[in-house]
Image (cartoon, coloured by chain):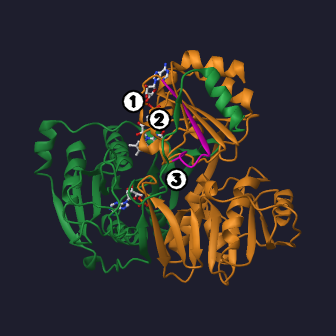
Chain colours: A orange, B green
Amino acid sequence: MAVLLIAEVTGADLALDATAKALSAAKAMGPVTVLVAGAGIAGAAAAAAALDGVTKVLAADDAAYAHGLAEPLADLVVGLAGGFSHIVAPSTASAKNALPRIAALLDVMVLSDVTGVVDADTFERPIYAGNAIQTVKSSDPVKVMTIRTASFEAAGADGSAPVEATASAGDKGLSAWVEDKVAASDRPELTSAKIVVSGGRGVGSEADFALIAGLADKLGAAVGASRAAVDSGFAPNDWQVGQTGKVVAPDLYIACGISGAIQHLAGMKDSKIIVAINKDEEAPIFQVADYGLVADLFDAVPALTQKI
Amino acid sequence: MKVLVPVKRVIDYNVKVRVKADGSGVDLANVKMSMNPFDEIAVEAAIRLKESGAASEIVVVSVGVKQAQETLRTALAMGADRAILVLAADDVHSDIEPLAVAKILAKVVADEAPGLVIAGKQAIDNDMNATGQMLAALLGWGQATFASDVAIADGKATVTREVDGGLQTISVALPAIITADLRLNEPRYASLPNIMKAKKKPLEEKTAADYGVDVTPRLSVVKTAEPAGRSAGIKVASVDELVAKLKDAGAI
Ligand SMILES: Cc1cc2nc3c(=O)[nH]c(=O)nc-3n(C[C@H](O)[C@H](O)[C@H](O)COP(=O)(O)OP(=O)(O)OC[C@H]3O[C@@H](n4cnc5c(N)ncnc54)[C@H](O)[C@@H]3O)c2cc1C
Ligand SMILES: Nc1ncnc2c1ncn2[C@@H]1O[C@H](COP(=O)(O)O)[C@@H](O)[C@H]1O
């Protein structure tokens, strides 16, 4: 049993929280080698080497990996796969892009969004927007999976594993990067924030989303949104929480003007404390909220921002 | 250019899912089934490419049970030209894994030689988010997943993708696989005349065996359980009470 963990790299930096959470899951399957692929990733490799319980870091430093394109990354991982029983990555957009490709190249199934490790072959994962949890046993020789980070604690960073350079597998040029549109923000990342304040269709406009952002900033929180808010152009796509957006489990989740559709709940119902502010007392979000406030958000959110 | 769109028959997204008492799975007998919502978006994207002149023919494919005919008819009514049903199961409860679906689709691609495959990003039943990427791997094609914008020109697709930090645009050489995300378009409804016309459009039936693909699952289901429930808490009467409760709970 040996595990290859594909670190999440953003730009040239290690996405520490996602990688450290996936590492906790990976350690239950065997000794872990971490692959850091990107361009100019010496710092990221060093950060990965400091994670607790890592045996070794493989650093693939090449322009081919600079933008997370699936094809060159998959070729790299398949080339390294011999000797590993498990290939694991956090469930990020880039891993969801690459891991199924890797699995198919190895002629094995992929397990998406693993939330529990029962044993080295048996895993839990949600299906039907989290309405059911399935335990599945894999008969494949190599288990390829993405780990739902909201389900695992981050590993510590007191380790010192050796870093070894690994050769690039090149780029066949099937796809090419054109541009990234990534908004820089001082707010905490949605998937690692301790507090998330989310707005839905009830917020009504992009301008009024400033109310949600204002409460978030007062609390040092990340901002989330429902699909309806994103589809309506009130909020950017990367704020979407839910079955097909991001899955979060903060200590505190405040839902404002969100009805609580099952697809939204799928992304936040494991939060420790849920607060719902909605003017409709029948809104399904109240069925999962620890504290529900039936109120107009245009009164309640500014008042809350002021009083905390 | 021919465009191939794989469409899956899934439980309707509005249905409340029930886990079977014996833990063997989810009850799908007598529940409303529909086309996977992401696949409606994929079909719509293909139709728009045809309307703009970038595509010439749209072939839709579904792998599964006989009843998936209905899903294919819906796609034909939206505007697809031709359908292929690949029978791979008798029981509505047996889900064909993405790897097996991708292997069957790879054979269909070999027969049909499309210039582009547009799949959905994710099936809302198994929530795998895998088939498009697996098909791209098996064909050795490029992939552009989670698309919110697609432009075709000069033998390439320029695709904007919804990623964790925002949006990424890539260019992928055709033939390629694109998977559709929620913001790619708003799918049209089929009109009654088009529903009637769709009944006459060709729907070919094949089997997994015709393609020589073994659909035996790699993952066996040990059990299916209800998630840990969450019970409703209390209603607070005012913002002040809410603040007090959150302070008591140590949440702020
Ligand atoms: C394939 C698929 C995938 C999906 N994925 C996701 C996903 O990942 N995430 C997601 O969120 N959704 C997802 N959805 C959409 C989901 O089904 C719902 O449509 C969506 O979550 C509704 O968003 P909402 O609650 O903001 O809007 P609505 O359901 O319209 O609710 C708005 C709420 O705001 C309240 N309100 C209005 N004005 C005020 C006010 N002034 N003060 C207080 N309250 C007010 C209303 O009472 C209402 O409850 C998906 C759907 C499909 C089909
Ligand atoms: N049985 C199937 N028949 C046709 N298309 C499928 C099937 N399963 C998956 N797909 C396609 O692959 C996409 C992703 O599905 P999945 O990988 O199962 O989440 C779907 O949106 C469909 O486009």
Q: Are marks 2 and 1 on the same chain?
A: yes
Q: Amino acid at mark 3?
A: Ala
- Residue denoted by label 2: A286
Can you identify the residue that label 3 sits on?
B144
Write down the chain letter for disc 1.
Answer: A
In-image side of A21 versus B38 (left or right)? right
Q: Which residues are magenta?
A: A267-278
Asked if the residues shown at circle 2 and circle 1 are in contact, with their CB atoms under 8 angstroms apart, the answer is: yes
Q: Position of residue B57 (x, y in %)?
A: 28, 51
Residue B31 within the magenta-colored segment of the rendering: no
Q: Is residue A221 left or right of residue A115?
A: right
Q: CA distance from mark 3 to mark 2?
A: 38 Å
Give the amino acid at mark 2: Phe
One can see residue A250 in this view: yes
Residue A270 drawn in magenta:
yes
Residue for badge 1: A282
Q: Nearer the viewer, residue A74 or A234?
A: A234
Marker disc for residue A183: none
